[in-house]
Structures are given as C-alpha cells and as structure tokens.
Image: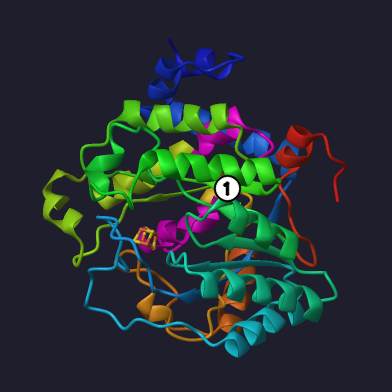
Amino acid sequence: MAVTDILNKKNLTRQDIIALLRAEGDDLKLLFDRARQIREQNFGRRVYYRAIIEFSNICRKDCLYCGIRRSNKHLVRYDLDDELILRAARFAFDNGIYSLVLQSGERTDRAFAQRIAHLVRKIKQMSGGKIGITLSVGEQDFQVYKYWYEAGAHRYLLRIEVSDPRLYPLYHPWDDLHKYDRRLECLYYLKDIGYQVGTGVMIGLPLQTLGNLADDLLFFKRFDIDMLGMGPYIEHNHTPLYSYRHLLIPLRKRLILTMKMNAILRILMPDINIAATTALQAIDQMGREKALDIACNVIMPNITPDHRQDYLLYEGKPCTDEGGDACVQCLNKRLEIYRLKPIMQDWGDSPHYFKRTSTPVR
Ligand code: SF4
C-alpha cells in the first residue's frame, strides 16, 4: 500500500507501521509532514521545558546497555547534597521553568524513599506550589510511589526500554532484579495511583527489528501512555552490549529511525507529550530541534549543578560541560531557529492525561 493511503487510514496496523518505518525520500517527507500537521493542531509551535537534575548515578541495577550500571567501575559515583539540588530547583524557578525532573539510578532503601519525599516537599514549598515535579528513579513498591505522589510529585518516567517480554532478557541480566513483569507492574502502579505516566524505548539496539519497533509503538497505544521519550541507542564502551556493536546500524540511520518513530507515534497518539531526547543531539547537533519541529513538544534542559560528566548513560552525551544557565540560554536560541516557542511558567502537562482520566485541565 502507498504511504499516502496508509496515512489516510484511521487505524494503523503493525504492517502499516513497518511500511512507514521503511519510508524514504518523498514518502518520508509525507510522513514527517503529517506528523508536523498533527503536532501543530494539538500544540501549535509550543515547546515545554522540563529542567532535569540528575542527582545521583548510584544504581543497584546492571542493565547491559547502561553506562552507569552497577558493575561499571570506570566512573566516579556521586550523590548530590540536598542543598545543591534545591539550589538547582531554585535556579529553574527563577528562570521561569516551572517543571522539574528529579532523576537518578535506582535505589529502594527506606532512606532514599524518605529523602525523595523530603525533596519534593521542599521544592513545592520553595516555589509556593508552582513547580510541577516529575520523578524518574526506577522501580519501586506501590506504597513508595503513593508516598511520593502524596508528597506532591505528579508525573513519573519509567522507560520500559524494550516492550517485548521475549526481548527483554537480551538486554538485561537474567536475575530477579531485572524482570520485565516487574517493570510493567510498576507502570500499572503509577497509573493506578494517578500519576501522569511516561515511558520509552531505545531505538537501534543490536538484533532489534522494524517489527519490534512497530510492536513498541502499539504497546504505547495499548497502554494508553501520557508521555514518551525515545532515543537512539548509543553504545557505551564499558557495558557488555558494546561487544555486539558490529550488529548495529550506523548512528545516522538510528537517528532517522528515531525521527520516524516519533512521527508515527504523534500520528497514533496526537495529544501525548513526546520528549526530544538528549541522545538525538549526541548524533546530530540540531537533532532535538529537528525532532521538535516534526513531532515532539517537550525538551529537557539539564541543570544538574555538578558531576554531569559522570551521568553518562551512553557515549558522547552532549552538554556535559556547561552550567544550567548556559544550557537554557543555548536552548532558547536553538528553538528560535525552528520558530518554536518555549512555554515558560507552565507545568506543560500532557493533555492526553486529562482526557484519559476525565479530570479537568489544571
Ligand atoms: S538503565 Fe537505569 S536501572 Fe538500568 S543500570 Fe542504568 S540507571 Fe540503573
């Protein structure tokens, strides 16, 4: 079937999605134009900022692709002081960014749970409730997620990374800490509690097929997700998956594939928030802005005050050597080039969440 016909269909099948993932030349332009049209109908040229603080690279897990995995001894482990984190949050607030992401490796001890709740309350207090908080600190028990929600966090990011349970063990150790079912269960917990839920996958992993990627997109639709962040897989030399790099498609192709995934997702789920991930910029200087121009509507300036070079999930991660101030100013200028409009003093919630839950928009 021609790409034009596929784009005119109301519901896309797995085969349709695979055909779109294969699109090139004029067909690719048609795909991107359609995604851009839907993005504009739903969000205009607006871009929401989420200032991200990567406050610790200590993680109990050992995912085979990740640069901060527990077994990697080639990096300095850090855990920022609360005071530094709060100062960074204050910086975001003073610069009109009212949406914050607190991200770290996974820890499940009681002290960690209490500390996160404390930070959430402090940030809320400091901003008079004006800062919206997203957490991204891995798999936790239902009660812990609830505790943080009640403390004031209202969005949570937990990437499924690979949505097919048969593929999950290819990229994770085979032990009780790395179970697909547990990850999925956590996503359901988050939804049940009332969070706006975000997930995502890596694109271009060794042995991953277009069929797998089509399945990932259908998974997001089926799960009825509110927010998405998908990035090209970029290998890290201190990880086990690095030995399989000969199976990878070139970086440029991973970038294009990610652009296609974002475009198809925008067509499948017009009103969700889609983040232009930093990994896009590691391949193309303007990768994030190009993704925003086509399908994405969220960008995450990194305002981590210290140790940014030690939060290398993958190699060549950009913007590890500048302060938060420089990062935000640089982004503003980059958006201007694509006539994109940063929205300040706004939580930038996912419109999809309010429809899904039939709650009034904040
Ligand atoms: S991907 Fe997340 S959970 Fe896995 S090792 Fe890296 S930081 Fe830890």
Q: Residues within 10 Å of mark 1 (few under 14, many from 20)?
A: many
Is residue 215 visible in this depiction of the protein?
Answer: yes
Q: Check disc 1 and give the amino acid type.
A: Gly
Residue at 51% in and 15% down: 6
Residue 360 position, x and y percent, is 88, 42
Q: Secondary structure at mark 1?
A: strand
In the figure, 91 relative to 176: above or below? below
Residue 327 position, x and y percent, is 56, 77
Query: Residue 280 colored magenta?
Result: yes
Q: Nearer the viewer, residue 281 or 361?
A: 361
Q: Horizontal placement of 322 versus 336: left or right?
A: left
Q: Nearer the viewer, residue 19 or 238?
A: 238
Could you say which quadrant of the image residue 43 lies in? top right
Indicate how the structure is coloured in the image. Answer: rainbow
Residue at 66% in and 76% down: 119
Ligand 1 sits in quadrant: bottom left
The residue that disc 1 covers is 198
Q: Specify start and end residues of the magenta stretch as a single range.
A: 262-290
